[in-house]
Amino acid sequence: MRRRPVGIAALSIFFAFGAAMSGLTAILLAFPGSSLDTVWNLNPVARDELPRIGVWAIALMLGACVACAAAAIGLWKGAAWGRRLAVGILVVNLIGDVTNAIVRSDPRTLIGIPIAGAMIAYLLSRHARSSQTPLK
């Protein structure tokens, strides 16, 4: 049995964290005014912008939660679909960072570009691909 590369394990944990945070955000949006609202202090812009979208914000966060959880599981298992899903999520995030930088004139979002790029490059590398379990 092959060992899971450290990079794949780290990305699995990264996506599991993303699932937890997007799930928590969905809960905060669905039940505003709870004692958990102090969590919004981590991202006050999201606190102000997401409720404007209405119920679609909850659906968006639940979708992100499911996608991140699936990517975390797929990466952890060494499945090719998990790696492809993770790349897809990162590409969408990359597009979002560029869009935010342009539309909202927020250059701080540009820090996500090299980070997402590095993660995508790693997931597309021979090393990451070789860690996949063969299809049965």
Image (cartoon, grey):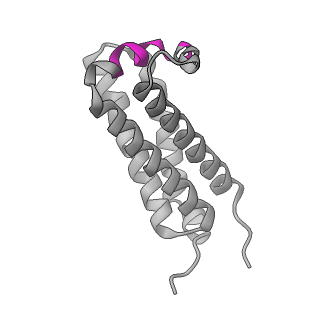
Report the residue at 60% width, 49% height from top: 11
Residue 12 horizontal side relative to residue 45, left or right: right
Quadrant assignment, res 63: top left
Which residue is farthest bottom?
136
Indicate whether residue 46 is drawn in magenta: yes
Identity of the residue drawn at 42% across and 16% down: 47
Viewer-closest of 72 and 47: 47
Q: In this view, does 50 lie to the left or right of 25?
A: left
Q: Is residue 56 left or right of residue 9?
A: left
Q: As rendered, which of 91 and 51 lies closer to the eye? A: 51
* Residue 33 inside the magenta-drawn segment: no
Location of residue 111 in the rendering, given as x and y in whole percent from the top left corner: 49, 25
What is the quadrant of the N terminus in the image?
bottom right
> Is residue 85 shown left or right of residue 38?
left
Is 26 rendered above or below residue 102?
below
Residue 116 screen position, x and y as percent: 48, 39
Residue drawn 54% across the image and 63% down it: 74
Q: Residue at x 43, y 60 (%)?
A: 84
With respect to residue 113, does 6 lie above or below? Answer: below
- Residues in magenta, as a range: 41-50
Q: Residue 104, percent across and down?
A: 29, 15
